[in-house]
Amino acid sequence: MTQAELIEFVAEGTGCSKAKVGRCIKALVQEWTMDLQAGLSVPIPGFVIVKPVTRAAIPERPGRNPSTGEAMTFPAVPERLSVKARMCAELKRALN
C-alpha cells in the first residue's frame, strides 16, 4: 500500500478530506521518527512495536570477488542505527 492509497483509504473511512488525512499521517511519521532518533520505542496499538537498535560496526576485511576469484578488501562499515519491528500479540492472534 502506498502513502497515497493509505490516505485515500483513511479519508474514505472517516469522511475527512484527503488533505487533512495526509497532514495527519505526515505528522505521525514525523513524531515517530523523532522518537526513534531519541532512542524510544514506538508502539502502534494493536499492530506493531517499532524500536531502534544499534548495529555493530564491521571492520575492514579481506575477501574474494566470486566472479573472478580476485582477492579484494571489503570496506569497513561504521556503527549505525536501525529499527526492529515486533508484532503485537493481538495481531499475532488474528493471523493465527
Image (tube, helix red, strand yellow):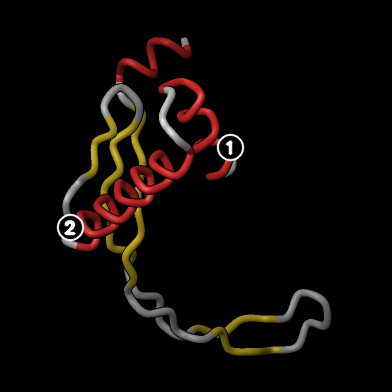
Which of the 4 image quarters holds residue 44?
A: top left
Q: Is residue 66 above or below residue 85?
A: below
Q: Position of residue 29 (x, y in %)?
A: 34, 50
Q: Position of residue 40 (x, y in %)?
A: 16, 51
User: Which of the two residues, 15 or 88, is positioned nearer the viewer here?
Assistant: 15
Amino acid bearing label 1: Glu
The residue lying at 27 percent from left, 50 percent from top is: 32
User: Which of the two residues, 87 or 71, is positioned nearer the viewer here?
Assistant: 87
User: Which of the two residues, 53 or 69, is positioned nearer the viewer here?
Assistant: 53
Q: Position of residue 95 (x, y in %)?
A: 47, 14
Which of the 4 image quarters holds residue 38?
A: bottom left
Q: Is residue 25 above or below residue 44?
A: below
Alpha carbons under labels 1 and 2: distance apart? 30 Å
76 lies left or right of 89: right
State the residue position of label 1: 5
Q: Secondary structure at mark 2?
A: loop
State the residue position of label 2: 39
Amino acid bearing label 2: Gly
Q: Secondary structure at mark 1?
A: helix
Along the polypeptide, which appears first: circle 1 or circle 2? Answer: 1
Whether tag 1 and tag 2 are in contact, CB under 8 A, the answer is no
The residue lying at 47 percent from left, 10 percent from top is: 96
35 lies left or right of 90: left
Position of the N terminus by quadrant:
top right
Q: Is residue 5 above or below residue 76?
A: above
The residue lying at 35 percent from left, 53 percent from top is: 83
User: Which of the two residues, 33 or 90, is positioned nearer the viewer here?
Assistant: 33
The residue lying at 75 percent from left, 88 percent from top is: 70
Which of the 4 image quarters holds residue 52?
A: bottom left
Q: Residue at the far right: name it.
A: 68
